[in-house]
């Protein structure tokens, strides 16, 4: 006997969420999470370069051209490619719960990773040239917001997965970036 309070559930109303569907919930487009992860990586690399300069008594002469084109951004390309092919994330992406995955398969291979990283350097940050990079980043932002994918992810058949962030992740990331800027101002004199 069915009580009036009991509701009869039709088979078409039963929804079972599979593991694949659970994972796709994290695929929401989040340009700011990507931006913060990328600049956390750049800041970590910059902190490493500052440390090396101090240890080597400023004998890293090839970095004196960084005021024309920031070579740190170019230097990051092979490092990022290696890390993406090895783990699918970089330190900044790990901190900000962002992962790059191929559309098919489990991990990116190094050749796709290096092409993607190089394309981000050119099309995503405009070679690190200060004025150009602002326009290129704005263009990439609006393209990502309207099309749902960046040109480099489309070309290399990759997608970026974002997991929810805690306030602490954002605070640590912003602290790394601010420390990098602060130490750059102190040691670039």
Image: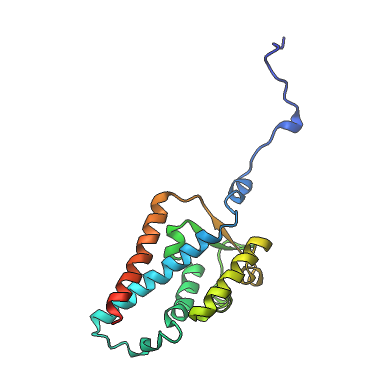
The residue under the point 33% across, 72% down is 47
Q: Position of residue 130 (x, y in %)?
A: 48, 79
Q: Where's residue 124, x and y in %?
A: 56, 73
Q: Residue at x 23, y 85 (%)?
A: 57
Decide if residue 11 is on the left or right side of residue 150.
Answer: right
Report which quarter residue 48 is drawn in.
Answer: bottom left
Position above or below: 7 against 31: above
Q: Is residue 108 shown above or below 114? A: above
Left or right of 167? Residue 28 is right
Residue 137 at x, y = what percent? 56, 71
Q: Which image quarter: residue 95?
A: bottom left
Q: Nearer the viewer, residue 131 or 160?
A: 131
Residue extending furthest front?
Answer: 131
Q: Nearer the viewer, residue 112 or 133?
A: 133
Query: 186 left or right of 27?
Result: left
Q: Which residue is nearer to you in this view: 172 or 22? A: 172
Quadrant that contains the C terminus: bottom left
> Residue at image x 36%, y 88%?
64
Q: What quarter of the picture does the N terminus occupy?
A: top right
Total numbered labels: 0
Residue 89 seen from this side: no
Display colour scheme: rainbow
Q: Specify the quadrant of the image occupied by residue 45.
A: bottom left
Q: Position of residue 145 (x, y in %)?
A: 63, 61
Q: Report whether residue 100 is seen.
A: yes
């Amino acid at each position: 006997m069915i009580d009036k309070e009991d509701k009869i559930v039709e088979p078409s109303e039963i929804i079972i969420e599979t593991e694949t569907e659970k994972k796709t919930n994290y695929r929401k487009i989040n340009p700011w999470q990507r931006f913060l992860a990328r600049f956390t990586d750049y800041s970590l690399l910059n902190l490493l370069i500052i440390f090396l300069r101090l240890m080597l008594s400023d004998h890293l002469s090839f970095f004196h051209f960084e005021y024309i084109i920031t070579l740190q951004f170019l230097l990051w390309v092979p490092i990022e490619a290696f890390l993406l092919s090895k783990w699918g994330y970089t330190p900044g992406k790990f901190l900000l719960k962002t992962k790059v995955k191929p559309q098919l398969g489990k991990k990116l291979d190094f050749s796709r990773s290096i092409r993607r990283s190089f394309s981000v350097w050119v099309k995503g940050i405009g070679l690190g040239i200060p004025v150009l990079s602002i326009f290129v980043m704005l263009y990439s932002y609006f393209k990502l917001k309207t099309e749902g994918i960046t040109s480099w992810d489309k070309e290399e058949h990759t997608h970026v997965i974002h997991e929810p962030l805690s306030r602490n992740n954002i605070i640590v990331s912003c602290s790394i970036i601010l420390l990098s800027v602060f130490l750059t101002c102190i040691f670039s004199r």
